[in-house]
Amino acid sequence: MPKPEPIAKISGDAAMQYTRQIVAFGPRWLDNPAHHRVEQYILEHLKGIDVEQDKFTQQTSVGPFAMNNIVAKFPGTKDGIIVVASHYETNYWLRNTSFVGADDGACTSALLLEIANKLRGRKLEGYSIWLVWDDGEESMKAQWNTQDALFGTRHLAQKWQQDGTAKKIKALMVLDMIGYKNLDILREEHSAAWLEDLIFQAASKFGYQSHFFNEKASVEDDHLPFAEVGIPVADIIIGPYGYNDAFHHTTGDTLDKLSPRSLQIVGDTVMETIAMLDQR
């Protein structure tokens, strides 16, 4: 069997520019005008691509909210799907602040847009690739509660379990907070060890291995609902964001903390991981 066509390296600078544009909409907590503008911004960028919108109304601890998971589908020649996902909203409980989630939701959503650029119009000689911009990841209140968060991915995981999609997914990678200048990706202990090993091999091909898996931790993130329905997952996420995690879920999560180089490192690693998955 011939090796799959290599996927082109992404542009960290382009991903950073998309990040700036998303941040410029302002705080994008659920169902506010900026949230809807970012939703439309993503959909506008994906015109001409097969896009599914998974719209639903979710009851939360602070009332019902309209949510929308956006799924861009790029067909491949092999029977199976690889998913890369990111949430795109900011925290509802920070709605009265200037919190824009530059690293927490904006840069990962932006990186998916740049990945979409590289997949658009290509013949994928491997598994189909689905990019997911999921909604409602953040907890509705300051006290983290997985039952009052992860709404979008929980809805999508249940849908995929019911319609048989879950069985077709070979691997799912969640991107969360990967634009920080001091990039240090955790080995996340709820993730599939074999998939994290593959990610490390992919990073090592580019000499990026020093940015990966220096520390271990368990993170309650968007990958959990998919893991619960049997999908192999990896959460690609940094450890502390700033000294003692000072920028996480604060108004200090701003563009100046990010680097195009970090987006390049993660983007290249994800795309190489996809190529390696195609060859398994």
Image (spheres, rainbow, N blue to C red):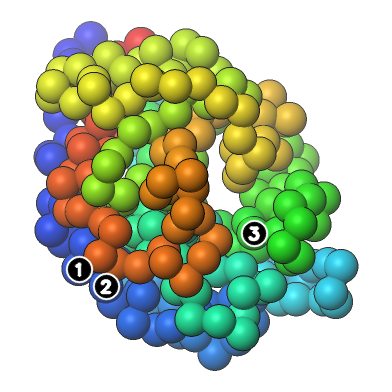
Q: Quadrant of residue 219?
A: top right
Residue 20 - label: 2
Q: CA distance from mark 3 to mark 2?
A: 21 Å
**Residue at figure coordinates x 33%, y 25% from the top left:** 212
**Residue at figure coordinates x 33%, y 82% from the top left:** 24
* x and y percentages locating residue 277 in the rendered image: 35, 20
Is 75 on the left-hand or right-hand side of 234? left
State the residue position of label 1: 17
State the residue position of label 3: 138
Kind of residue sitting beneath label 1: Gln
Circle 3: element type: loop
Quadrant where the N terminus is found in the figure: top left
Dot 3 or dot 2: first in sequence order is 2
Q: Does any portion of residue 108 appear in the rendered image?
A: yes
Circle 1: element type: helix
**Residue at figure coordinates x 74%, y 52% from the top left:** 144
Kind of residue sitting beneath label 2: Arg
Q: CA distance from mark 1 to mark 3?
A: 24 Å
Is 5 on the left-hand or right-hand side of 128? left
Kind of residue sitting beneath label 3: Glu
Mark 1 touches mark 2? (CB < 8 Å): yes
Quadrant where the C terminus is found in the figure: top left
Circle 2: element type: helix
